[in-house]
Image (cartoon, coloured by chain):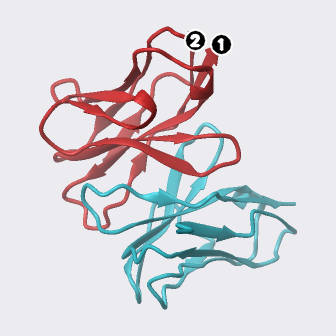
Amino acid sequence: AQSVAQPEDQVNVAEGNPLTVKCTYSVSGNPYLFWYVQYPNRGLQFLLKYITGDNLVKGSYGFEAEFNKSQTSFHLKKPSALVSDSALYFCAVRDKGDSSYKLIFGSGTRLLVRP
Amino acid sequence: NAGVTQTPKFRILKIGQSMTLQCTQDMNHNYMYWYRQDPGMGLKLIYYSVGAGITDKGEVPNGYNVSRSTTEDFPLRLELAAPSQTSVYFCASSYSGGPTEAFFGQGTRLTVV
């Protein structure tokens, strides 16, 4: 069965410090991988995606993510956190072999950046 | 460009009542989805559609129905509302499957009392 795990309910980091939000996945084939961010009372906004090629992908707002096939991970990173980065982050996977093209989401990680 | 629009934003229903959550997109996307978001549970897929006239069940379809008569609209119908349907509902669309990202509406917060 396809699944996505975000092992941390919350990540706390000081402004200016690097941040990492972890994600691991389980799919039968090769996946497309996504990160979304949700601000309070808003829908999900797309941050970045991995399709193929370079394992390090760059996205919006200075975020990047590293794909590691052997560890089936897709961790979200940012070199220097901002208070405004505080939000709920979701990792999602789409199985290339699934004709519905649905996204399977992790349970989310709340990022809190303190001044 | 409005993107994905959901109405209403908030609704309180009594047990046993019915309602329709509206979703429309103006991006000419073929694929549309309904998710529900429960605290600490991520998003669960309720129904999806790969084009007008085609719908299929997701992970948690019980108690819901959908239709897709046009490319733009994908309403979600709740029949006989139950407290377990208290949730935040998100509609999403994507141009195609594969590597394209999905665009989400702002959500409908539904409380069943």
Which chain shows up in cyan? B
On screen, residue A71 versus residue A108, left or right, reads: left
In this rendering, the answer to whether B105 lies above or below A108 is below
Mark carried by residue A114: 1
- Residue A52's quadrant in the figure? top left
- Residue A78's quadrant in the figure? top left
In this rendering, the answer to whether B47 lies above or below B109 is below
- Badge 2 amino acid: Glu
Can residue A74 be seen here? The reply is no
| Secondary structure category for the residue under label 2 | loop
In this rendering, the answer to whether A109 lies above or below B94 is above
- Badge 1 amino acid: Arg
In this rendering, the answer to whether B104 lies above or below A27 is below
Q: Are marks 2 and 1 in contact (CB under 8 Å)?
A: yes
Instruction: Determine crowd level at label 2: few under 14, some 14-19, many 20+ residues with C-alpha closer than 10 A.
Output: some
Chain bearing tag 1 is A
| Location of mark 2 (residue) | A15
Q: Position of residue B37 (x, y in %)?
A: 61, 50
